[in-house]
Amino acid sequence: MPSMLDAVVVGAGPNGLTAAVELARRGFAVEVFEAAETVGGGARTEELTLPGFRHDPCSAVHPLGIGSPAFNAMPLARHGLEWLQPELALAHPFPDGSAAVLTGSVGESAMSLGAEDAGAYRRLVAPYLGHWDTLAEDFLRTPWDGLPRDPYRWVRFGLDALQPATLLSRRFRGAKARGLFAGLGAHAIAPVSGLATGGVALLFAMAAHEMGWPVPRGGSQAISDALASYMREQGGTIRTGTEVKRLDELPPARAYIFDTSPTALARIAGLGQAYSGYRYGASCFKIDYALSGPVPWTAKEARRAGTVHIGPTAGEINSALSAAVAGRDPSVPFLITAQPSLVDPSRAPEGRHVFWAYGHVPAGWEGDATDVIERQLERFAPGFRDLVLARAVAGPPQLAARNANYVGGDIACGAFSGLQTVIRPKLARVPYATAHPAVFICSSATPPGPGVHGMSGHHAAKAVWRRLRAV
């Protein structure tokens, strides 16, 4: 072992592992420290309910994973990562039994919105079709990191992306298109009337058309395991079950990279109040189900979709997110649900299914949203409760206990509001650098933000190797 490492990474989530891989590939000596017994962070798979039912405690469906420039530059398939595409990426059901859908076909998606909005939807996505590679590279980065690869589309997408989802969807006449768009924007975990939620909606829609919304065979753990395997192949070392409380507990290294919340980084690295202005957002109430059969959706499209959004109208969706951000108890939640065993039967015993659902609740909320979530599910899948064999419930305290990066249960590691939507964790030309010249941050608190795509780790690694080369 070298007397001094080039880099130590704290946290083996997708961003920490990506940063480690990027440095190890360039010949640097790298070691990763992870508090949990297994790697993964927000990309894990565990038997949470009954034996043989393999659940994803956090992320399950990965449009930005299959579309990630960082992941696509690595031979992850050789390390066991296989993407499985459901028949439909997304279904958004309505009370009349119909549904809007997102699929690989823009035409099919547009027609599901009704004749009144099919043309408007086609016009909205047309400028970006066939340009996922440059769009992803230009938008999954920090805005001031050199010139964009495709300046024309970067500016055009940026003008759309900065708008609230509610404003961008004004070009639609009907409730279906507006509802679908609001549901996509709600992935920001912020009211869809907020700045830049239109960009989140548009990015997810484009991902559905260009890359799909797949699940990894075997569960999200497959992404983390593939990254870890590739990192070890490059000569890196991973130490699990090792919590880091102070910088001086780590071996000597030329750089330290933290896949942690800014708060934890400041505490461990002795940076005082460096991130005292950083704000965390609303949380989630998540339920993992073991079911005796597939979800009995009224809308037939929902029975073929990997992801189903529950909350028909843009108004209902915005109210649900606004309530969570304002600290109010959930009454009619907007639900994001996933049914991975539809496309990957290995996730549950034969004929059985795993199902994953979450609604939004205030940060640190200690109530129980099981009943309001299941009432909302029963609205669109009557008889759902009769299929439940077991459920694993996690509110904000459980989410925060499971993953230290989820402060107050915020799975996005930072509020998506105001200037923090584009400037995180604080205003800096290199947001991955800190006041300590050898300490860097690579978590979802840095650009481009949350999602299992490894791009924060990729960009942080770039900042680190520039510094290591300079030194």
Image: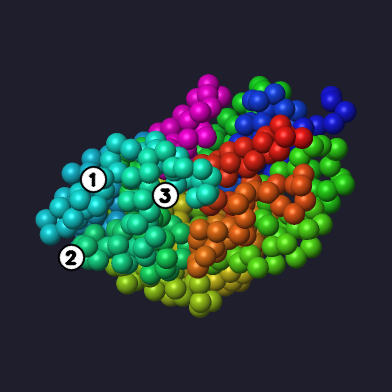
- Which tag, 3 or 2, sits closer to the chain's start? 2
Pointer 3: residues within 10 angstroms few (<14), some, or many (20+)? many
69 magenta-colored:
yes
Report the residue marked by disc 3. Answer: 338
Q: Locate residue 140 relative to residue 257 in the image: left or right.
A: left
Q: Where is residue 23, by image quadrant?
A: top right
Query: Which mark is in front, 3 or 1?
Result: 1
Q: Quadrant of the N terminus?
A: top right
Relative placement, left or right, of 258 versus 146 is right
Q: Which residue is label 2 attached to? A: 173
**435 relative to 311, above or below:** above
Q: Position of residue 227 (x, y in %)?
A: 60, 32
Secondary structure beneath disc 3? strand
Identify the magenta region.
58-84
Between the C-alphas of marks 3 and 2, the distance is: 28 Å
Nearer to us in this view, 201 or 13: 201
Q: Please provide percent x and percent y for residue 19.
A: 64, 37
Residue at the spot 52% in from the left edge and 49% down from the top edge: 144
Q: Amino acid at mark 3?
A: Ala
Tag 2, which secondary structure? loop
Answer yes or no: is residue 385 visible: no
Q: Name which quarter of the figure residue 427 lies in.
A: bottom right
Please name the residue that numbered disc 1 is placed on.
Answer: 126
Where residue 444 appears, as percent x and y from the top left, is: 58, 51
| Mark 3 or mark 2, whichever is nearer to me | 2
| Residue drawn at point x = 84 percent, y = 25 percent | 2
Q: Residues within 10 Å of mark 1 (few under 14, many from 20)?
A: few
First in sequence: mark 3 or mark 1? 1
Q: Hey, what amino acid is under mark 2?
A: Arg
Name the residue type under label 1: Ala
Q: Give how far across and how far down residue 461 sits, in percent.
A: 64, 38
* Residue 445 magenta-highlighted: no
